[in-house]
Amino acid sequence: MSPLFYQSKKESVWDYPRPPRVEPTSKRIRVAFAGVAIADTQRALRVLETSHPPVYYIPPQDVRREFLVPSGHKTFCEFKGIAHYWTARVKDQEAVNGAWAYPSPSAGYGILRDHFAFYVHLMGACYVGNERAEPQPGGFYGGWMTSDIVGPFKGGRGTETW
């Protein structure tokens, strides 16, 4: 059999839509911080938006909320609405505004209500299946970069006007 048969298809972030699409994934999504598993699910949703790696949203029942403290920080997304942020706190370590959710998402994004997303660069480790994700370039966007996603990606120096 051809070696190409065994290669998984890569997704280009330039094939993702704008406005973003939300879709379920059966891949296991895990988040660890300070050596503690704070989220683990096979019921995540992923948000796909042009030029961005996927952002994974985890159902609240699959997140260990005892390690998240509301921070009071909020941001606005033109598509999803107002995001509320949480600080991850384990023992003496914390990741300020390391997680966010949409308690009252905009029309068309209701499925995301109360699901948590995490910044890869602020967590100890984030996994899609067995692969450790890398953070999207820059500090603002929360995409999870894996080997099956190709760019170029928005977020790095010089991409602000894309």
Image (tube, rainbow, N blue to C red):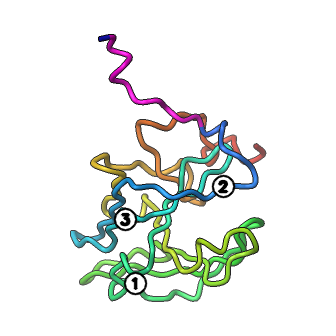
The quarter of the picture where the N terminus appears is top left
In the image, which is nearer the foreground, mark 3 or mark 2?
2
User: Label 2 to label 1, Cα distance in Å?
Assistant: 27 Å
**Separation of residues labelled 3 and 1 (CA atoms):** 12 Å
The amino acid sitting under disc 2 is: Arg
Residue 92 pos. (x, y %): 26, 83
Marks 3 and 1 close (CB-CB < 8 Å): no
Left or right: where 133 falls relative to 151: left
Badge 1 density bin: few <14, some 14–19, many ≥20, Cα 10 Å: many
Q: Which residue is the site of mark 2? A: 21
**Residue 11 lies in the magenta-colored region:** yes
Q: Residue 68's mark?
A: 1
* Residue 109 is covered by the magenta coloring: no
Give amino acid for label 1: Leu
Tell me what residue is drawn at x 40 percent, y 30 percent.
Answer: 8
| Closer to the eye: label 2 or 1 | 2
Residue at image location 60% in from the left, 34% down from the top: 152
Q: Quadrant of residue 109?
A: bottom right
Q: What crowding class fits label 2: few (fewer than 14 Cα within 10 Å), some (14-19), or many (20 or more)?
A: some
Q: Is residue 72 above or below residue 10?
A: below
91 to the left or right of 49: left
Gap in angstroms between the C-alphas marked 3 and 2: 25 Å
Q: Does dot 3 land on a helix, a strand or a loop? A: loop
| Residue 155 position within the rendered picture, expressed as x and y whole percent measured from the top left | 62, 48
Magenta segment: 2-12
Q: Position of residue 88 (x, y in %)?
A: 39, 78
Amino acid type, callout 3: Met
Give whichever of discs 3 and 1 has the lower sequence position: 1
Q: Which residue is mark 3?
A: 123
Q: Under tag 2, what secondary structure?
A: strand
Q: Is residue 134 above or below residue 111?
A: above
**Which one is nearer the viewer's eye here, 131 or 35?**
131
